[in-house]
Image: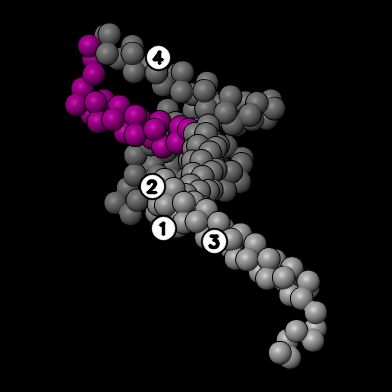
Amino acid sequence: MPDILSTRQAAERLGVPFSTLRQWIATVPIRLDRDVTGNFLIDAAALETLATVRDMRAAGRTLREVRDHVNGQVTQQLTAERVSGRSTERDDAASNTVASELIEALLPAMKEAILPTVAQAILEDTQRAERFGQLAHRVGELEAMLRERERELTDVRSQVALLPGPDRLADLERDLALRTQELDQRDREIADLRDRLARRPWFAFWR
């Protein structure tokens, strides 16, 4: 049995479809190298991890549960390597690869957890923007109404300024009183003349 398998060979060895194995590799944090063409190289340790994934999936465990289980194993392994002090340069590179793959594996779950929150925040921001736009429109209407009332008030003030003041009103009242007296005097004179005409015989006008 070769030490390194291709993805398709590993799928045949595990007895699972090639597409299923690709999904596990994309979801579960597994330490894998690549060849010059970018294809995954599956060693014995990775094949053992994939076998664990197969068994857990067959037992009805979800991919998230499988991912958490494998992630715990990887973390324990890295911790043990650091404590023992046996980490070599290759192990450090592999650790970096595992960390990168772990981040890539966790990204879907992070997106699932973060995207709804981000979408809700965007929705709330949009609603706030709409309310702000409505309030700004209402403020504009009120400002227009206020300017109209100010113009009306200015017109009223101009009309009030044209009205006579208290002194002028007093003069007008005195003038009106004098004219009223003159009219009364003329009315009395006309009444007296009519009275005299009424007492004089009609034939007196022919003399």
Residue topped by disc 4: 76
Rendered location of residue 64, percent (x, y):
57, 28
User: In the picture provided, is 181 more to the left or to the right than 90?
Assistant: right
Q: Which mark is residue 3?
A: none
Q: Secondary structure at mark 3?
A: helix
What's the magenta region? 85-111
Residue topped by disc 1: 162
The answer to whether the residues at label 1 and label 4 have Cβ atoms under 8 Å apart is: no
- Point out the residue furthest to the top here: 83
- The structure residue drawn at horizontal position 40% and vertical position 31%, both measured from the top left corner, is 102
How far, Cα to Cα, is label 3 from label 4? 124 Å
Specify the amino acid type for callout 3.
Glu
The answer to whether the residues at label 1 and label 2 have Cβ atoms under 8 Å apart is: no
In this rendering, the answer to whether 75 lies above or below 7 is above
Rendered location of residue 167, percent (x, y):
38, 47
Nearest to the eye among marks 1 and 4: give it: 1
Mark 1 closeness class: few <14, some 14–19, many ≥20 residues within 10 Å: few
Specify the amino acid type for callout 1.
Leu
Q: Secondary structure at mark 1?
A: helix
Nearest to the eye among marks 2 and 4: give it: 2
Nearest to the eye among marks 1 and 2: give it: 2
